[in-house]
């Protein structure tokens, strides 16, 4: 009899309601997958399930009343416990609305910036001087620029070699190139990646900072390892490692160089942005 009542109540509007709720939880699972929030959420679910089972089996009225009034407490606790994941999700959803690229450096200047970065990375790699270079795109990086030393200087390999010389005051941090194609600041402090799916658990602070920046923005992050001299690049929560200057140039041309493809229709840009939000939200990395 109850099954008949359930099937009779499944109106098209109710089915749509169930589908939207399932889609919401499915999307949220992408944002917390591979992070510490998974373990926290699993623990909370197990504890609540155990308490509900005990209260129903032993008919504990006070405990059942407490569970029934926990919604207010959970509404406050969830944003506090999952604050990093919620912030990352909101930032990615906000960037999904950037369907039109902001004005930036002209194509000729971008080509020169790519050449200068590749030349500097190659020399830094040979000398095993650690470096972290950030290329700003659509996401504003002003808050991270303010953590460093303002420069507002023209990009050049010599300047990068000077900034990341181990005995200078600016080497321990990131150099950020703004969307106008100038080195806005050096010795900048970046957020470290909180993802557990790292391409190498032994990655140092520079690589974790590059991944962290790529997780919270659409910036391109070039890293030179101080220990091995290897060149890596991070974007959208992913890292490609063991690069030489030729492969680095190819990737930078694809991510930052002159746009050679025709502009996509609006609906395709919306589709790609939504796919990037749900496909890259957990910061999956790969190493090649």
Image (tube, rainbow, N blue to C red):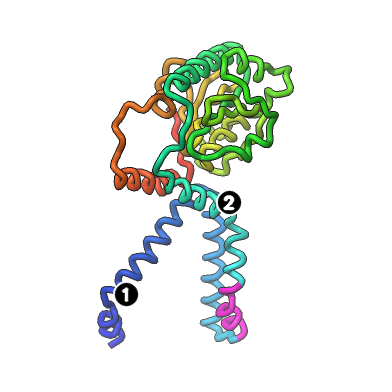
For residue 162, above or below residue 23: above
Q: Quadrant of the N terminus?
A: bottom left
Q: Is residue 91 left or right of residue 21?
A: right
For residue 70, above or below residue 122: below
Q: Is residue 123 left or right of residue 21?
A: right
Residue 41 among magenta residues: no
Magenta stretch prevailing secondary structure: helix
Name the residue at 49% across, 34% down.
137
Q: Could you say which is closer to the camera, residue 241 or residue 17? A: 17
Name the residue at 56% across, 64% down.
44
Say which mark, if any, is on residue 84.
Answer: 2
Residue 122 in view, yes or no: yes
Q: Is residue 26 left or right of residue 128?
A: left
Q: In the rendering, at what x and y percent does residue 39 appear?
A: 55, 55
Q: In the rendering, at what x and y percent does residue 192 appear?
A: 60, 39
Q: Quadrant of residue 64?
A: bottom right
Which residue, given by chain and number where applicable, does mark 1 sit on? Answer: 14
* Image: magenta residue range: 62-72
Residue 64 among magenta residues: yes
Which SS class for mark 2? helix
Instruction: Point out the tag, 1 or 2, that comes first from the N-terminus.
Output: 1
């Amino acid at each position: 009899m109850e099954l008949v009542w359930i099937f009779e109540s499944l109106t098209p509007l109710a089915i749509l309601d169930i589908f939207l709720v399932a889609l919401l939880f499915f999307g949220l699972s992408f944002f917390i997958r591979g992070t510490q929030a998974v373990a926290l959420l699993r623990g909370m679910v197990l504890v609540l399930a155990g308490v509900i089972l005990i209260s129903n089996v032993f008919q504990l009225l006070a405990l059942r009343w407490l569970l029934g009034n926990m919604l207010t407490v959970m509404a406050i606790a969830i944003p506090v416990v999952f604050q990093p994941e919620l912030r990352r999700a909101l930032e990615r959803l906000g960037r999904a609305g950037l369907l039109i690229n902001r004005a930036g450096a002209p194509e000729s200047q971008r080509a020169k910036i790519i050449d200068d970065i590749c030349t500097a990375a190659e020399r830094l790699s040979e000398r095993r001087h650690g470096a972290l270079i950030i290329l700003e795109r659509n996401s504003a990086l002003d808050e991270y620029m303010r953590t460093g030393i303002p420069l507002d200087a023209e990009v050049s390999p010599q300047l990068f070699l000077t900034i990341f010389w181990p005995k200078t005051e600016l080497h321990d941090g990131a150099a950020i190139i703004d969307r106008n194609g100038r080195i806005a600041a050096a010795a900048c402090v970046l957020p470290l990646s909180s993802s557990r799916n790292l391409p190498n658990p032994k990655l140092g602070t520079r690589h974790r900072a590059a991944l962290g920046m790529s997780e919270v923005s659409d910036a391109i992050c070039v890293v030179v390892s101080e220990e091995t001299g290897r060149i890596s690049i991070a974007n959208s929560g992913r890292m490609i490692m063991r690069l030489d200057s030729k492969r680095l140039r190819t990737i930078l041309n694809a991510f930052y160089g002159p746009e050679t493809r025709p502009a996509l229709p609006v609906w395709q840009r919306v589709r790609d942005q939504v796919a990037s939000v749900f496909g890259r939200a957990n910061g999956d990395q790969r190493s090649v």
